[in-house]
Amino acid sequence: MSPKLSDIPVFVPSHNNVSVNVSNVTNATGTNSTTSISTFNPETSTSFTPFSPSTPQVQTNESNYFSGKNGEHDSQNQENNGQHDPSGQSRQQSEHHYIEQDPSFNEPFFQQTNLYPINYHLYAPQASTPLSLSKKKNERTVNELFISDHLRQEIQSKNEECLKTVIPSQYNLPVHVEQYHSLYPIDLKYDKSANSFGYPTTIYKVQSNDDGKLYAMRRLENVPITSEKSFASIPKWGSINNANMVKVHEAFTTRAFGDNSLIIIYDYHPNSSTLVEHHFYHIKQREPVLITEDVLWNYLIQLTNALSDIHQQGLAVRKLDPSKIIMTGTNRIRLSSCALPDILEASTEIREKEKNGDSAGVNISTITDKLNSNMKISETEPPKTNIDKNKLVELQKADLKELGLLIYNLAKTSVMISDNTLEPSAIISKLKLSDFFKSVLRFLILEDEEGEEKTGGITVAKLQALIAPKVFSNLNQLQFATDDMESQLSREVENGRLVRLISKLDLISNRPENIKDGSWSETGERYPIKLFRDYVFHQVDDAGKPVIDLNHVITCLNKLDAGVEENLLLVSADEMSCLIISYKTLKNLVETCFNQLRHR
Ligand SMILES: Nc1ncnc2c1ncn2[C@@H]1O[C@H](COP(=O)(O)OP(=O)(O)OP(=O)(O)O)[C@@H](O)[C@H]1O
C-alpha cells in the first residue's frame, strides 16, 4: 500500500519555512495532492541540519514512497524508483532495466571499462532486436538516445587505429624520418610487394612533429632518384583538394631506413581498405562486399570527380588500380597513391638523360643534404614540369580508359564467363546491368580510333555530361547521408551537455578534503544536490539491488539541465529526512555551488 503524501515527514529548513501548494507534486498513488507542505528555499536557508528524530517519522510500510508513479518518471520507469526498503519486501522488478534487455550482459554498464579489446557497445548496449520491442509512439529505447551503434563502432575503431603504436626496434624502424615519428606499419602483414611500382613498398602511419597530426607515409625502397626535378609535380599535386583523392603533402628521399628510400606523405585515413581488400578478401571477420550496379555507379561518379580536378591541374593519375583506391568510409573512395607514378617516371627520364650525357640531373647527395638541413623539396621553388601538352592529353585519355577498364573488370566479377575468347563488347552485353550503364562502359573502353578522330576522343567533360543524370541521384543520397549524420550529431550534442552537468554534480558532492567536518556536502545548499545525486544514481529496489535505469538518469538530468518548474521529492538514505524541491531551484543551487567551488 502506498503512503499518502500528507503522511510523509517534510524537510524543515532551520528557519523560514515557506508553505507551498504541492498540487504539482504527483504522489505515490499517482493522484495529485493539495496538502500544504514546506519546501526547501536555498535563498532563505544557509545551513541545513538533517532532520533525524529518535523515532523515524517515515512510515516504513511495505512499499516506500518511490514504489509507485511519482511524477518523475515515465510509465516505463515507475517501478525502478525504489530506494532502500528496510522491510526487505521485494517487489516485481522492472522489465525495462537498461542492462537486463541483454541476458548475456550481467554486469552494470560501467563495469567493463578496462577490458581489451574495447567493447564498442559498452556505452549503450544494443537492444537484442529493436524490431521485436512493441513500443508506443512516444516511447524510446536507450539506443535512440545516442549515436547509432554502427557509427560509434566505426568512429571508435578509427580512433583506436590512430592510437596504435609499435616499438620501433621490434620492426627495425627508425625512430623518426625527418619530422615524422612514431612509425606504425599500416599493412600489418608487413608485406613488401613490388607489384605496383616495381619497388618494395610499405606504408606507415606517422605523426608529424611540426603539427602533431597523423599522416600516411608511403616508402619505396632503394629508388635511384638522382635529381630533385623528379619531384617537380609535387606542388601541383599538393594544391589539389578533392574529396576522392588522398591529399599529397610532400615527397623526399631519405637514408633513415638505411637505404635510399623514396617517401611520399599523404593524409592518413584510419581503418581504410583498398578496393581489392573490400571486395575480394575476408578482413577482420568482414565478408567481401558484393559489387552491384549501385556500387559501380558510385565508384564511377567519385573517380570521375577525382579525375576532373586532377586533369584540370594539368596532371594525370597514370595508375587506376583497385589496390591503389582506398575505401575511407561508407561508400567513400579515394585515389591513394597520386604523384608517385609522376615521380618515378620523371626520375627514370632524368636517369636516361644522365646516361646520354645530359646534365639535367642533380646528384642524390645534393637532395639528401638539403633534406638534412630540413629543406623540403615540396617547399623549394618548383622546377618546371616538362610533360608536353600532347603527352598530357594522351595520359589523360589513358586515365579515362583505365577508369573504364577498372569499372568493367569490377562489373565482370558479377557474371560467370567461361569463354575466355569473348571480346569486351560481347562481355558487356552479357552483364546484368542497365543499358545506360553499359552504354557508359562502351563509351569508356570501346571508343575506337575512327570515332576518336571524329569526336576528338574521350575527355572528363564528356564523361561528366554522359553520367549527369546519375550524378543527381547520387547527390540526393549524399544529402540524405549528411542529414543522417547531422541528426546523429545533434544527439551527441545533448549527451555532451549531460556530461558537463554530471561533472559539475560530481565536483560538488563528496569532496574528500571536506569529509572530515562534513561541512561541504552535508549541509546548506549542497545537501539537496547530494540527495539529488543519490536519487538519480544510487537508488535500490525493494530487494536492495541497485536500480540501473539509464532512462531515469537521463530524464532527471535533462530536467535539471533545463531547470523545469516540476517539483521532486528527495529522501535521505536513512529515510529520516526528505524535502520537496523544484528542478529549477536545484539547477540554481548547482550553479551557485559550482561557482563557489571555482572561487575557493
Ligand atoms: N592514406 C592512407 N591512409 C591510411 N591507410 C592507407 C592509406 N593508403 C593506403 N592505406 C592502407 O594501407 C594498406 C596497404 O596499402 P597499399 O596501397 O600498399 O595496398 P596493397 O594492397 O598492399 O598494394 P601493394 O601490393 O601495391 O603493396 C591498405 O590496407 C590501405 O587501405
Image: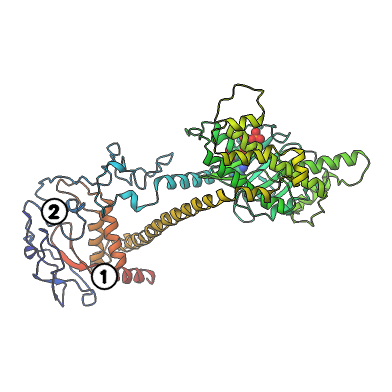
Query: Which picture quadrant has residue 350?
Result: top right
Q: Report whether 592 appears left or right of 229.
A: left
| Contact flag, marks 2 and 1 (Cβ < 8 Å) | no
Whether residue 29 is situated above or below residue 131 in the rendered picture: below
Q: Is residue 42 left or right of residue 448?
A: left
Disc 2 crowd, CA 10 A, few/some/many (<14, 14-19, 20+): many
**Circle on res. 271:** none
Which mark sits nearer the N-terminus, 2 or 1? 2
Amino acid at circle 2:
Ser
Residue tagged by mark 2?
A: 67
The residue positioned 27% from the left and 37% from the top of the image is: 103
- Please, is residue 200 above or below residue 252 in the view? above
> Ligand 1 quadrant?
top right
- The answer to whether residue 245 of the structure is visible from this angle is no
- Estimate how packed mark 1 is, as few (under 14), some (14 to 19) or many (20 or more) residues with alpha carbons within 10 Å: some
Give x and y (percent) for residue 86. 11, 51
The residue under the point 53% across, 53% down is 475
In the image, what residue occupies the spot 55% across and 28% down?
Answer: 415
For the question of whether residue 221 can be seen, the reply is yes
The CB of the residue at mark 2 lies under 8 Å from ligand 1: no
Q: Position of residue 262 (x, y in %)?
A: 73, 42
What residue is at 76 percent from the left and 45 percent from the top? 454
Q: Position of residue 181 (x, y in %)?
A: 63, 47
Res 564 quadrant in image = bottom left
Q: Nearer the viewer, residue 321 or 98?
A: 321
Report the quarter where the C terminus lies.
bottom left
**Residue 52 at x, y percent in the picture:** 12, 63
Question: Mark 1 falls on what kind of element?
Answer: helix
Q: Nearer the viewer, residue 218 or 442?
A: 442
Residue placed under numbered mark 1 in the picture: 584
| SS class, disc 2 | loop
What residue type is disc 1 on?
Lys
